[in-house]
């Protein structure tokens, strides 16, 4: 919620300037340094409201930092948080968000159940799976196609693992999961679908780490990838 509040105030700040024909490229308009120069470009009648928006933005940032510290401190009370934080892209904040939602990994017997809870389950059914035959009866359609991801899920968890996949793809170029992403895209998989595959794989890894209480081992992941590549 707090992140959305910060983004909303950022948008309102830019609107105040752009509505008066003032371009606001980048993020310099939010910075305290040079703020006076930005305000001087506004008409006098608009400065007071914009100053209050800047003050609201500064207070939200302070509150965001305070809450992050509280989240980290609360997560550190649980021993498993240090294990989960070793997973690629899963930093202390994401771990702190993950813990109170999942609570225990033993709620999920299989990774497919966990994928569905995270909104990463692939739906294979639709309302047109059955067709009427010439005899008047109903038969199952022969074509099986994916229908997207399941919609009944925890949106926070989905955001966590999508963010983890984005972090791996954009920053962790030495991790075997990034190498797996490159293999998928080079084989013709669309980047968004390859990133989804990475997110699903990270979710499965995190579930197994949590159940076994063992830290992330990229060496084992490299062995698994090698076996899959050799089999294909």
Image (cartoon, rainbow, N blue to C red):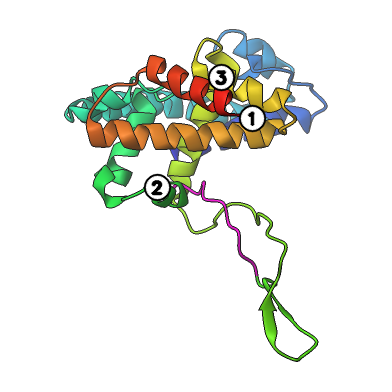
Q: Position of residue 33 (x, y in %)?
A: 57, 8
Based on the picture, tell me whether residue 120 belongs to the magenta stretch. Answer: yes
Q: As rendered, which of 175 and 61 lies closer to the eye?
A: 175
Q: Magenta part of the protein: which range? A: 118-126
Q: Which residue is mark 1?
A: 13
Location of mark 3 (residue): 178
Quick check: 98 left or right of 118? left
Secondary structure mostly taken by the magenta-highlighted segment of the chain: loop
* Residue under the point 79% across and 22% down: 22
Q: Tell me where residue 208 sits by quadrant.
A: top left
Q: Residue at x 49, y 24 (%)?
A: 227
Classify 144 as above or below 9: below
The residue pinned by badge 2 equals 114
- Residue 68 location, x and y as percent? 34, 26
> Dots 1 and 2: beta carbons under 8 Å?
no
Q: Nearer the viewer, mark 1 or mark 2?
A: 2
Note whether 56 is above or below 114 in the view shown. above
Q: Secondary structure at mark 2?
A: helix
Residue furthest toward the right? Answer: 21
């Amino acid at each position: 919620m707090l992140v959305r509040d910060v983004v909303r105030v950022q948008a309102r700040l830019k609107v105040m300037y752009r509505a008066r024909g003032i371009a606001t490229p980048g993020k310099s308009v939010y910075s305290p340094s040079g703020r006076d120069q930005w305000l001087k470009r506004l008409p006098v009648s608009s400065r007071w409201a914009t100053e209050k928006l800047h003050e609201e933005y500064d207070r939200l940032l302070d509150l965001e930092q305070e809450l992050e510290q509280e989240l980290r401190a609360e997560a550190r009370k649980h021993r498993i948080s240090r294990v989960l934080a070793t997973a690629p892209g899963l930093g202390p904040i994401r771990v702190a968000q993950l813990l109170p939602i999942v609570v225990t990994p033993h709620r999920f017997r299989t990774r497919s159940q966990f994928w569905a809870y995270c909104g990463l389950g692939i739906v294979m059914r639709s309302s047109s799976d059955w067709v009427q035959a010439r005899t008047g009866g109903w038969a199952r359609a022969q074509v099986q196609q994916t229908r997207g991801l399941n919609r009944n899920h925890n949106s926070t968890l989905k955001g966590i693992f999508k963010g983890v996949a984005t972090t791996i793809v954009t920053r962790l170029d030495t991790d075997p999961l990034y190498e797996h992403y490159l293999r998928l895209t080079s084989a013709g998989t669309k980047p968004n679908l390859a990133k989804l595959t990475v997110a699903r794989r990270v979710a499965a890894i995190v579930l197994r780490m949590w159940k076994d209480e063992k830290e992330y081992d990229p060496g084992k992941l490299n062995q698994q990838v090698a076996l899959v590549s050799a089999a294909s």
